[in-house]
């Protein structure tokens, strides 16, 4: 179930492994790589903190489902056997004129 | 600061991020008190039932000589543009089946196409990493071909998807294999904004699909090979508004729900999912084992006008019609008598929602409409 939550929580953090040469502090590339990764982690941390604060004020899924249901059932849908509201005659324009699938066989090459 | 100190800071920052992710996951789980189907059942809803002649194929559009990869409807007239690997775009009158334009493309490896809101121009993109715009009112050249009126160049990878900004023929959004999405000003041919890229909260793999919110055209969603969908605000390109997790494979298709508050996804993991954009919650997973018992990737999705039906095309040729509320497959268009002979690669609903168009590797497009008796409530 945990893998089915729509959260940024599922994103794994990739840890940068610095080469042995970087340990001495002379490898500028190693240093720059860690700094760049650190910047990204700080940014991630900030975004996640924001998302967590936002989530504290977020309603349960059942509340959203109530709204979804009301919204869905108030819209007319030409492809459904049961229509809420008036039927538009234009919906059936697809059944006017020739319907034979073999009627047009011209090819543009 | 020494490398050793930096490494310590890096380690601490990693722990902080992982801890926050864990807390987020727990908090989100606590809010998942139900899903759409569980709630709908608790409210006494029953699945949609289709009779044998309710959804019927009423048109077959023949003319392409290669696999159809993409299609799009006009917002007004009953016209469709389709893109095929025969190297052509064809603009069809879907009612009469007539070909209005056959556009020979500079690059045959096309992956996506789109109609402009006014229906005056079409766009396409593919392996040439360019989004080409064709003005349908332009005169043809001496060979009878419609010339490219604008080339939007700048992506560093294939153009997988494109969509015009609703009510604007001047702006378009593309998704690309270079992991970014771009908002273009077609008039100048320049990039207005780039979404994602290095060290931003963007996708970490190819972008495969995009969908612009019909209710609020500043918002769009993208699906990617990184198994996530991301929500973007065109005014804030530097970071995604939200990242949606859950899929375990490439997100091949994304489509906004009719109300604009939710969107659907289709993935290589064989599932479709419904997400809420305001809360980030995953509301439902749509999955059913196929007859071959393998995980069958979803290639394309579309919602009916109310959102009650979710159409999903799969690589094995199935095209499931899901009852979005009950998470049940109520019909398989792929198994109907007049269906395609190969995989359904693209789906699209007409502007008024009265017809579904399917495009296939069998080179044809088919129009499906409701041919049964409607009950009104």
Image (cartoon, grey):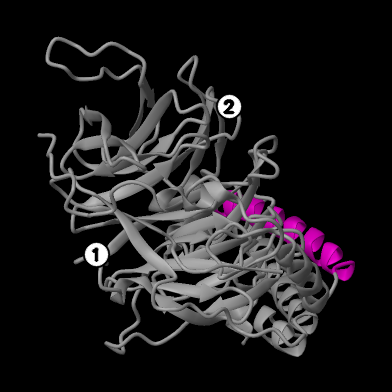
Chain where mark 2 sits: B
The verdict on a common chain for dots 1 and 2 is: yes
Residue A94, image x and y in percent?
Answer: 41, 50
Residue B44 position (above or below residue B314): below
In this rendered view, identify the residue nearer to me: B104 or B348.
B348
x, y percent for residue B130: 33, 31
Question: What is the magenta range?
Answer: A31-58
Q: Residue B300: percent from the left, percent from the top? A: 41, 61
Magenta stretch, overall SS:
helix
Q: Chain of mark 1?
A: B
Based on the picture, tell me whether residue A99 belongs to the magenta stretch.
Answer: no
Q: CA distance from mark 1 to mark 2?
A: 34 Å
Quick one: SS at disc 1? loop
Question: In the rendered view, would you say B285 is above or below B351?
Answer: below
Query: Which residue sits at x=13%, y=39%?
Result: A106
Residue at 39% x, 87% y: name it: B289
Q: Where is residue B107 drawn, in percent x and y?
A: 20, 33
Q: Is residue A100 left or right of residue B358?
A: left
The residue at which mark 1 appears reads as B340
Q: Residues within 10 Å of mark 1 (few under 14, many from 20)?
A: many
Asked if residue B83 shows in the view, the reply is yes
- Residue pointed to by mark 2: B168
In the displayed structure image, the side of residue B344 where residue B372 appears, left or right: right
């Amino acid at each position: 179930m945990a893998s089915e939550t729509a959260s940024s929580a599922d994103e794994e953090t990739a840890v940068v492994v610095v080469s042995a040469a970087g340990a001495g502090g002379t490898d500028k590339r190693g240093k720059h790589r860690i700094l760049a990764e650190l910047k990204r982690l700080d940014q991630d941390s900030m975004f996640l903190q924001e998302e967590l604060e936002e989530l504290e004020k977020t309603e349960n899924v059942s509340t959203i489902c109530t709204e979804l249901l009301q919204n869905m059932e108030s819209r007319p849908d030409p492809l459904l056997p049961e229509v809420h509201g008036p039927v538009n005659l234009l919906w059936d324009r697809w059944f006017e004129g020739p319907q034979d699938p073999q009627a047009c066989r011209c090819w543009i090459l | 600061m020494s490398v050793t100190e930096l490494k310590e800071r890096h380690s601490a920052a990693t722990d902080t991020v992982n801890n926050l992710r864990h807390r987020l996951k727990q908090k989100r789980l606590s809010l998942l008190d139900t899903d759409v189907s569980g709630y709908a059942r608790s409210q006494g809803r029953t699945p949609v039932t289709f009779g044998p002649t309710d959804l019927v194929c009423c048109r077959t559009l023949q003319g392409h000589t290669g696999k159809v990869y993409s299609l799009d409807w006009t917002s007004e007239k009953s016209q469709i543009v389709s893109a095929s690997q025969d190297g052509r775009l064809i603009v069809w009158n879907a009612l009469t089946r007539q070909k209005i334009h056959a556009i020979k493309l500079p690059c045959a490896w096309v992956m996506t196409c789109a109609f402009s809101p006014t229906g005056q121009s079409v766009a396409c993109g593919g392996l040439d990493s360019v989004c080409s715009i064709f003005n349908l009112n332009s005169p043809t050249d001496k060979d009878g071909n419609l010339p490219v009126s604008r080339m939007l160049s700048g992506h560093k990878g294939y153009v997988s998807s494109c969509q015009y900004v609703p009510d604007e023929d001047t702006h378009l959004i593309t998704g690309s294999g270079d992991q970014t999405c771009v908002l273009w000003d077609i008039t100048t041919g320049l990039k207005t904004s780039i979404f994602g890229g290095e060290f931003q909260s963007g996708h970490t793999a190819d972008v495969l699909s995009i969908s612009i919110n019909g209710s609020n055209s500043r918002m769009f969603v993208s699906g990617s090979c990184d198994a996530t969908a991301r929500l973007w605000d065109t005014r804030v390109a530097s970071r995604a508004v939200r990242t949606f997790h859950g899929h375990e494979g490439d997100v091949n298709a994304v489509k906004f729900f009719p109300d604009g508050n939710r969107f659907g996804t289709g993935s290589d993991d064989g599932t479709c999912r419904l997400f809420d954009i305001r809360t980030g919650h995953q509301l439902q997973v749509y999955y059913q084992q196929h007859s071959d018992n393998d995980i069958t990737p979803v290639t394309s999705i579309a919602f009916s006008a109310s959102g009650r039906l979710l159409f999903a095309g799969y690589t094995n040729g199935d095209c499931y019609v899901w009852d979005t509320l009950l998470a049940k497959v109520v019909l398989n268009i792929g198994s109907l008598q007049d269906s395609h002979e190969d995989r359904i690669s693209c789906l699209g609903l007409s502007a008024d929602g009265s017809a579904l168009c399917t495009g296939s590797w069998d080179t044809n497009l088919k129009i499906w409409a409701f041919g049964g008796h409607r009950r009104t409530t």
